Amino acid sequence: MTLMEFFGCTFIAFGPPAALFILTIANEPLRVIVLIASAFFWLLSLLLSSIWWYIVIPLREEIAFGLVFSVIFQEIFRLLFYVLLGKAAEGLKTFCQQGEGDTNMLSLVNHRHLMAYVCGLGYGMVCGTFSLVNILADMAGPGTIGIYGDPQNFFLASAFMTLCMVLLHTFWGIIFFDGFYTKKYYQPIVVVLSHLLVSCLTLLNERQPPMYLASILPAYASLVAMGIWAFTIVGGSPRSMKAYVVRES
Amino acid sequence: MAHLSVILAATFLLLGVCVSADRTHQKIYYDISDSDFAMCYRRLNLTHETGCSSSRKGNVGVLQFLETPENVTWLIQNGAHAPYVALLTPELFVHDVIYKLRDSGKINGLLVIHTNLSDYLPPASFSPDSSCPNEYNSMYSGNSTYAHCSNVTWNPDGDSLVFQRFDFPIGILKNWTQIEFMIENCYRKFNEPVDGVVGPYPLCAAQVKSAMDGAKDTPTCIRRSNTITNLNPIGYCDPLGDMNSFAFIEPLNSTDTLANESVTLVAARLDSFSLFFGTDPASDSSVAGFLTLLSVVEALSKVKDKLQTAVKDRPILFVLFNGEAFEYIGSTRMLYEMENNFFPGFLQEDDIGAALIRPEHIGNFIEIGPVGIPEEDSLWLHTDPVIAANPSIKEKTDYLVTEMKKAATGAGLNVTSAPEVQPLPPASFQAFLKKYSIPGFILTDHRSHFQNKFYNSRFDTHDRISVVYDNVPANETYDHITQGAKNLAKAATAVARAVYALTTNSSDDSIVADELTMTHMLYCFLIDHQCELFNSSLSSANAALLEKHAGTDPFSTYVGINQGGSSRNWVSILAHGILSRFSGETETEESLNCTLTKTSECEKKCKEKNDNDKNSYARWFLYTWLQGPLNITTGERPGICVKSTANGSVARSAAFDIDGYDWQSNEFPVWTESRWSNDAMLVRVFLLPEHSYEVALLCGGLALTIVFFFLVCCVSKKSDAIFKSTPDSS
């Protein structure tokens, strides 16, 4: 039985996002609501991508075609959600004030970076779920991949790729929203380009034999880059980090 | 739903983690298609369960291809990756090897190659039946001299595999391409030991599933099935059974009761079995016998006019018994019906002077047993030594035998009496003799033990009874008269003449069984069921089903289950259709009062006739609308209305139909077949990952998660300190 493989991959792909969700989001209802709303917008982009793929019959077999459009749709819906949040901010504020006046709740609306992070994580989690759940379902059975000569580490690569995408979406969310807020429009453009780049790199997995490292290494490189950028955007700096570490020790 | 899954599949491509448009499932598993394997399944009797069952999810084991006895020894002694699923050559799939493998405890399933390739020939002999078939329902079971085949072991090759219980599934694989994949891409690539050492993981494994619902024994299973637990009753097993077919040359005179010992009963059995579902061609075990009987019916129908007066006093009853391989289900049931005055079923006891047939009315019993492989170029007559103790019975039996031999000599057939000290071989006749003393004989191809080395097995194929088509062009095979057809036609001629002589006390050498008809029947039952004879002997609805029936494999002769209705299996439907045509006559346009070009009108008339004729004589007839022969010019089948006495009676043990039947009385056979769900049978191969790799993966995943929890916890506590951001003014 490959049940251990199943759980191993599940933990790799969804353990870190679960940690983020449980420790930073789950205990605050408003964040959960925003996260779900964000996930719903990703689903809408998926629906549109699927319809688009279904309509354009001649290019159905061309994965690259669907892939590029899917990335574009995802980013359009991220923008739409940003616009919607802006419109909803006032209402959310009222909603919070009418209640107990919980400062934590208000802080979400007041901290735009926190809002961007919640949206990004929601986007990433649903994306990760959809990309891995089918594979996970097949993984639980008694067999593992390879009878047709496919590489053994397919599951592992899929899990790490999924994790990477979840975290990337989180960072992209922060950079993207900040770009529009501060009118630095090059930021969303970089997000779209890096999304396209990472996605297109996975096309390499189609080759025989697949080059998993060729897609995973650049993906993680861009994850690190995006992470650092997002870190600085939200006000972090090497100095603050150092100060924190020193204080802790 | 299909669209949804397409969209989902497409989506996950878009997300860039999949490598092709297939489900990952298809990259993991190599599935053997349903039609290319056959599994051993489960049956229950009074006290035991027999056959195989896997676990609910199917048994998984490392695939090991066993070609030689050395391989088997290696697996048992050195195999370190248990449990195994062994892929065996047919030659190795014999009693000893199976038991050795089972007792080693290393086996989780067996697969056997079953192709007609010359590389993998069957063993020299193989019969999954007992060495003493139907031993426990034999007429001799209480007899000190003959019980348990102590005198003659009828089936020396029998190893009783069908009556064993296996805790693991066993299946045969029929498609060479798939078997080759399993051997080359699965076994040789991953599992084959090099210098006695099996290579590193991943290893290739097989999953074999035949999950059975029934368990323990028939009484338990029937009780469980009848327990009403909710509104949707679930059954776990069904009684074995089908329909017997019978026909008379002429209807009986319904105004008189029959005289004792007046009826001549000519019988043959329809069914057989094998260890694997649906793979039991039974060429010699049953087909040769019942085809001979059908041929006898045809031959005698042609001289119906001459027989007409004689059969008024000495009716001839032809019977095809079904379920005989399982303790004489069909004959026991018919005897039960005769004893209780409802045979034939369309007559009622209170009918004035109804010609009900009771067991004491039977004067001669002629049974055609396996006749396909003549021993010493002769057929053999078996008579019962026990009832021969009665001088009058002995005298009548001797007379029968003499008439048969005389007829055989006339037909150019050697017929010899089997040694008189021998008991009867397993046959329907025994079910009658168990209670009644009836003179009769069984015509077989063996002197003592069976000639057939593959009795009731998957190897009992057409070539065993000399039905071979070497170097015959494909378009001529249907009409090609084989040696087997000649043999059987000769036997049929002899039997037909003997029956004629017994009935009329005169001989008629013009009676000849048609070789070509026999040829067609053999071809259809044993070679290819998409044939003219079958198509013309079926109703149009059944013909449509026949056309849809995949493959050309012979139809299974296994009796199957009877849930209480009058459903028949294919062999039963076809044998009955042919019996109707041979024993009856085709209604003409005048008698039907319609023109045959207007098919539907005639069909309606035929049906009306069947429904209307209820007066006591006419109800002996059934009017059946069959497709009939092909009109060559139009390419259509206008249809025929067959008027025949051929009728059916239930072949299902009375035990299931008697209220409050005492199971322990052992009066009737109580075989049942376990039910299984639609997805209960499966064979597939795939790779198994190394255990340590799996553990590493799981630990890695867990570690990653824990580290992240720790990090996130630390960072989120001090987020204000790290991210020096202030609340937005907006």
Image (cartoon, rainbow, N blue to C red):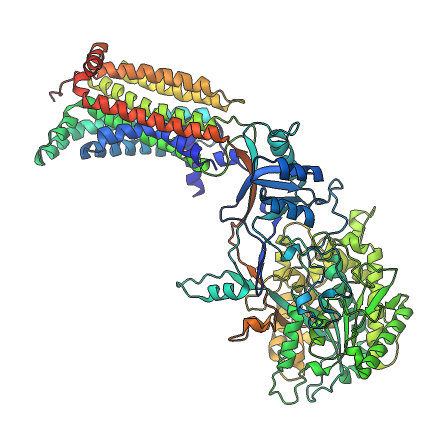
Q: Quadrant of the C terminus of chain B?
A: top left
Identity of the residue drawn at 32% across and 33% down: A44
Question: Residue A35: x percent and y percent?
Answer: 25, 31
Residue shown at the point (63%, 58%) measured from the top left: B163
In percent of the image, x 63 and y 84: which residue is there? B615
- View extreme (top): residue: A239
Q: Nearer the viewer, residue B599 or B351?
A: B351
Identify which residue, B569 or A246, lies in the foreground: A246
Does residue B561 sit above or below A45 in this rendering?
A: below
Q: Is residue B314 left or right of residue B598?
A: right
Quadrant of the image for the N terminus of chain B? top left
Asked if residue A66 can be seen in this view, the reply is no
Residue B541 position within the rendered picture, expressed as x and y whole percent measured from the top left: 61, 61
Instruction: Looking at the picture, tell me which residue is in the foreground, A1 or B692.
Output: B692
State the image coordinates of residue B606 (x, y, percent, origin top left): 64, 72
Q: Is residue B47 visible?
A: yes
Which residue is more in the foreground, B235 or B421? B421
